[in-house]
Image (cartoon, rainbow, N blue to C red):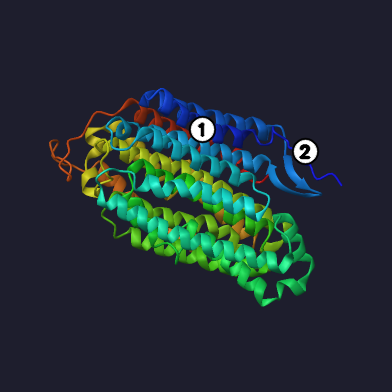
């Protein structure tokens, strides 16, 4: 028997590009030792990874590392979408980091290397075909962030945030691995599609207490990663203590990775009748608690963090339709998965635009400050304030932020098609609650305030750095374009 497998290097090209970026960043930092060169290599590598993912995905689905019909690497339309979005988010966060890196607040080589390593995990995650690849990719995405969160020199809040994030992530990883081990003990398989087929065909396996425990542990472990209530308490403190660009990465690329991992195991592996009720409960708790607590926030990043928690609830909501028989038909399930992925893409683009707007309005290297620091900011800096306002309105689901509006309509439509009208009503009610704090912050941007009012941290406003301006402009344009062409994202998400 031939044990040598043929490897499709074209299918692996996006992963090669992402990992190669990390290596080139290290070499450049070692040999050239010029911050600009290191940042340029990281930026070009991220852009090349995004282009590579799109080109490979456009050629159709490719599989490699296969044993019979079971493959550990499946790169299709959805994997290409996830890989390209993660790479572009990395590029955007790198641009937001330029002012702090130039100011010497973080070591450039280490910062860019860790960001590239995390990007590699995100690219691999979208194509994972077995539990081992999935969990390793998720940890590769997360591990560098422990250091990035605490990389701000001389900041006690940053160190505390890093420690909180590390402890919670280790617990979440342990729970996820235990769930995967129990699932392997029950089925003897690791490939996602094979596991799903075994559990679907053999009802005696689904009825085992060990299977129930495995499913519960997997869901709980991944729920930690996406900051779903009640496994969310780490997120606000971690986001607020991290440097602003790292908080943006946590809220976008890292959260997208966790959501993709959860969607993959729910779609391809775990029994819908067991996961559906749990996901419906998680969705209701997450969106409701996130929105209600966000109403009371006075610090900008904490408000965005709680908003991110609520948005995770909206993304999980379509999967709650699996609790009902009408939501478990092939058509309803496909619509639910596509709606969840599409909403996640819309959300991360708008969230990046929001963080870019806050970064543009704050001094280089400063934290997000309080909401009072943003009062009247749009009067002093009209287009920066307008871009932030557009992102906030989009997250609220109001025009002209059409991306957010279409995202919420897509979720509600998927729930109605799956017979979960009650959950669609909960989504609609929470969207109304969310309006209160999104519009409050947006209105504060144009509120009257003395022109000479200093920031609360005592730092004067600084001119907008060119790279940050580019990121803010591109993220805003991307949000507008996606809002005008939402079907493109839906089609890719449905593949």
Give the camera-side residue of 139 and 374. Answer: 139
Q: Residue at x 62, y 62 (%)?
A: 180
In the figure, 55 relative to 309: above or below? above
Q: Residue furthest right?
A: 1
Q: How far apart in space, not on screen, are marks 2 and 1 (Cα)?
A: 25 Å
The residue that label 1 is drawn on is 23
| Contact between labelled residues 1 and 2, with CB atoms less than 8 Å apart | no
The residue that label 2 is drawn on is 6
Q: Position of residue 202 (x, y in %)?
A: 78, 69
Report which quarter residue 216 is drawn in: bottom right
Q: Quadrant of the C terminus?
A: top right
Q: Position of residue 163 (x, y in %)?
A: 36, 56
| Left or right: residue 396 compared with residue 324 | left
Q: Residue at x 69, y 64 (%)?
A: 184
Report which quarter residue 420 is drawn in: bottom right
Q: Residue at x 76, y 46 (%)?
A: 66
- What's the mark number on residue 7? none
Q: Position of residue 423 (x, y in %)?
A: 54, 64
Report which quarter residue 434 is drawn in: bottom left
| Left or right: residue 367 compared with residue 476 | left
| Left or right: residue 176 compared with residue 207 | left
């Amino acid at each position: 028997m031939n044990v040598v497998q043929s490897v499709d290097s074209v299918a692996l090209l996006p992963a090669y590009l992402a990992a190669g970026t990390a290596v080139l960043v290290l070499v450049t930092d070692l040999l050239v030792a010029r911050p600009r060169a290191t940042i340029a290599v990281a930026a070009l590598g991220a852009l090349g990874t995004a282009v590579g993912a799109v080109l490979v995905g456009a050629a159709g689905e490719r599989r490699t590392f296969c044993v019979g019909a079971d493959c550990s690497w499946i790169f299709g339309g959805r994997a290409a979408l996830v890989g390209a979005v993660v790479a572009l988010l990395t590029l955007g966060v790198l641009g937001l980091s330029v002012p702090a890196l130039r100011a010497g607040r973080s070591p450039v080589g280490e910062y860019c290397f860790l960001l590239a390593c995390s990007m590699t995990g995100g690219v691999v995650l979208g194509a994972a075909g077995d539990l081992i690849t999935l969990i390793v990719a998720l940890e590769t995405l997360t591990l560098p962030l422990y250091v990035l969160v605490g990389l701000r020199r001389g900041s006690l809040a940053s160190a505390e945030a890093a420690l909180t994030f590390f402890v919670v992530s280790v617990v979440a990883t342990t729970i996820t691995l235990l769930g995967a081990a129990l699932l392997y003990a029950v089925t003897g398989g690791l490939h996602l599609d094979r596991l799903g087929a075994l559990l679907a065909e053999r009802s005696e396996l689904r009825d085992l207490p060990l299977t129930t425990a495995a499913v519960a542990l997997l869901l709980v472990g991944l729920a930690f990663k996406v900051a779903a209530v009640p496994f969310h308490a780490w997120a606000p403190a971690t986001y607020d203590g991290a440097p602003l660009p790292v908080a943006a990465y946590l809220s976008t690329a890292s959260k997208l990775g966790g959501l993709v991992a959860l969607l993959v195991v729910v779609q391809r592996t775990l029994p819908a009748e067991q996961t559906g009720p749990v996901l419906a409960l998680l969705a209701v708790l997450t969106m409701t608690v996130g929105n209600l607590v966000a109403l009371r926030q006075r610090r900008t990043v904490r408000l965005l963090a709680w908003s991110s928690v609520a948005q995770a609830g909206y993304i999980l909501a379509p999967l709650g339709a699996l609790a009902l028989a009408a939501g478990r038909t092939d058509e309803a399930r496909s619509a639910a998965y596509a709606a969840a992925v599409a909403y996640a893409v819309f959300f991360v683009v708008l969230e990046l635009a929001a963080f870019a707007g806050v970064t543009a309005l704050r001094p280089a290297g400063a934290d997000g400050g309080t909401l009072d620091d943003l009062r009247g900011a749009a009067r002093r800096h009209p287009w920066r304030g307008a871009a932030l306002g557009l992102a906030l309105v989009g997250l609220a689901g109001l025009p002209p932020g059409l991306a957010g509006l279409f995202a919420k309509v897509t979720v509600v439509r998927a729930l109605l098609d799956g017979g979960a009208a009650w959950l669609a009503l909960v989504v609609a009610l929470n969207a109304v609650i969310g309006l209160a704090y999104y519009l409050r912050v947006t209105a504060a941007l144009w509120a009257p305030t003395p022109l000479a009012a200093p920031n609360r941290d005592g730092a004067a406003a600084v001119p907008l750095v060119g790279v940050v301006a580019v990121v803010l402009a591109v993220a805003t344009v991307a949000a507008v374009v996606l809002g005008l062409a939402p079907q493109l994202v839906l089609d890719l998400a449905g593949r």
